[in-house]
Image (tube, grey):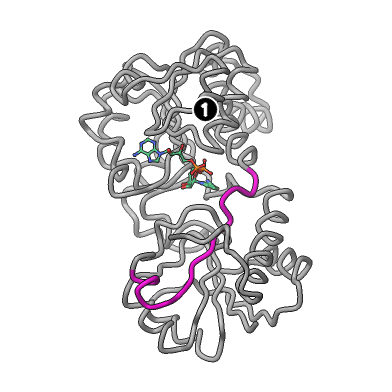
Amino acid sequence: MKIAVFSTYHYDEEFLNRYNTGHELTFFTLALHADTAPLANGFDAICIFVNDKVDKAVLEILKAAGIKLIVLRCAGFNNVAVADAKAMGITVVRVPAYSPEAVAEHAMALILTLNRKTHKAYNRIREGNFSLERLMGFNLHNRKVAVIGTGNIGKAFCKILSGFGCKISAYDLYPQDEVKAMGVQYGTLEETLCDADIVSLHCPLTPETQYLINQKTLKLFKHGAMLINTSRGALVHTKDAIKALKSGQLGALGLDVYEQEGDLFFHDLSEGIIQDELITRLISFPNVLITSHQGFFTQEAIGEIARVSFANIDAFCNGEELKNKVD
Ligand code: NAI
């Protein structure tokens, strides 16, 4: 199969070439959107990542170009108009769970860094400043953590939290016995948010979850609580989060995702002028830590993404059942 691979960096090429089962790959560093979609001419399939946008207009260009298959090398599919793709006869496949532990561990890394301020200590000590002023954190042991979404990543995160001795509450549309067996207490969204020291988001972005964290729900938070989002940027209403940070209602914010990350994340903009006023405001807070959608970024996860992507492509080519089809 001839496959156009969008939004690629050297590590994508390295791992996709390593796991390739015999397909012809052409790598584009460009993201996929209406202006770049014509690059798909002459290919059978496209392979895309989280910030490639496949709306109806892009699908029409892809359909005219002869694309039959969209291979998502990620779990989330909120960036693809799936119903329109289906109506046009274009199949969409994804990698549902490549390494839930990778993202769960990153969520914990954000918590530990924000709490114990190791990023600040690192910089201070390099400058000969050995003071402990303003570096005080809190014990995670016995603290209450709210986990929103207890699927693959949320569950892996609950296991990590258990190891730290945290009290875990959770909200999910479908509570799981396996999670309850870990001692996790399910409740409504309101119950789960209201007395947590830390809230961590692990549900997908859907019309129901867009801006799940907004002015109203932020008011339910315990004053000074920490919010962690490693799921999708638009789960959090950024302007409302900024207001809550300014008032102190939100005590700390750890983001691996951002609602307007498409033009920023994965790019080196260090010599440019950042036009996005919200991210620059967020960066200015001493209690905000942002990483550039790197939760998934481990050797294990990238290898698994490549392996499962080719298994999906091969199943499609061989007319086999597509267990990772997005429907
Ligand atoms: P999953 O599908 O295994 O779990 C999602 C859970 O959210 C399910 O238990 C589901 O019932 C629950 N859920 C769905 N709608 C909900 C709602 N309205 N309210 C409450 N719970 C709801 O997904 P997984 O693998 O755990 O991934 C979660 C999200 O993490 C993905 O959708 C993706 O956005 C994000 N992600 C982020 C990565 C990163 O690098 N930062 C990498 C991979 C995924």
Point 45% across, 87% down: residue: 38
**Residue 325 within the segment the image draws in magenta:** no
**Residue 92 within the segment the image draws in magenta:** yes
How many numbered callouts? Answer: 1
Q: Give the vertical position of 213 relative to 90 (above or below).
A: above
Closest to the observer, 218 or 117: 218
- Give residue 310's quadrant in the image: bottom right
Horizontal side, residue 153 vs residue 77: left or right: right
| Magenta extent | 84-99
Type of amino acid at the residue the image marks with label 1: Leu
Secondary structure of the residue carrying tag 1 is: helix
Q: Position of residue 9 (x, y in %)?
A: 63, 66
Q: Position of residue 264 (x, y in %)?
A: 45, 58
Q: Give the vertical position of 144 relative to 76 (above or below).
A: above
Horizontal side, residue 273 vs residue 303: left or right: left
Point 26% across, 21% down: residue: 220
Point 32% across, 73% down: residue: 56
Closest to the observer, 46 or 119: 46
Q: Position of residue 92 (x, y in %)?
A: 49, 67
Quadrant into which the N terminus falls: bottom right
